[in-house]
Amino acid sequence: MKKTLIVLAACLLLAACSKVTLENYNKLEMGQSYEQTVTLLGDPARCDEVIGVRQCLWGSEEKGVSVNFVAGKVVLFAARNLK
């Protein structure tokens, strides 16, 4: 029982510490580097690259941030269901 409570508390702390927030989304800027974006939002959930365009997702398709990079710089970003 005690072990279960510790695991549950750790999960809640991790969820509360998410950097994928509307406040951090509003700090994104065109031309920002991939490294600056990771510093702001944390590690992406996934990244895909096609024809020199790297698209990364923070959070999920339902609630998160999508950022496109060309040559390591932000060229397009969008948010979905952030509060």
Image: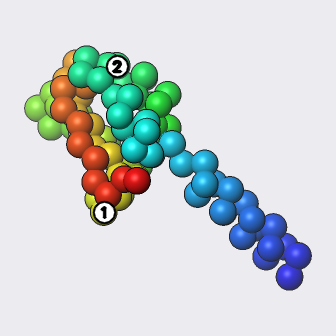
Query: Which of 22/38 is in front?
Result: 22
Q: State the residue at coordinates (79%, 76%).
A: 4
On the image, numbered disc 2 is attached to which residue?
A: 33
Q: State the residue at coordinates (44%, 45%).
A: 21
Image location (x, y in percent) of residue 83: 40, 53
Q: Is residue 82 left or right of residue 48?
A: right
Q: Is residue 14 left or right of residue 45?
A: right
Identity of the amino acid at label 2? Ser
**In the image, which disc is placed on residue 41?**
none
Q: Quadrant of residue 78?
A: top left
Q: Is residue 52 above or below residue 20?
A: above
Query: Which of 18/72 is in front?
Result: 18
On the image, numbered disc 1 is attached to which residue?
A: 62
Q: State the residue at coordinates (60%, 54%).
A: 16
Image location (x, y in percent) of residue 80: 28, 54
Q: Are marks 1 and 2 in contact (CB under 8 Å)?
A: no
Upstream in sequence: badge 1 or badge 2:
2
Neighbour tally class for label 1: few under 14, some 14-19, many 20 plus, Cα within 10 Å: few
Neighbour tally class for label 2: few under 14, some 14-19, many 20 plus, Cα within 10 Å: some
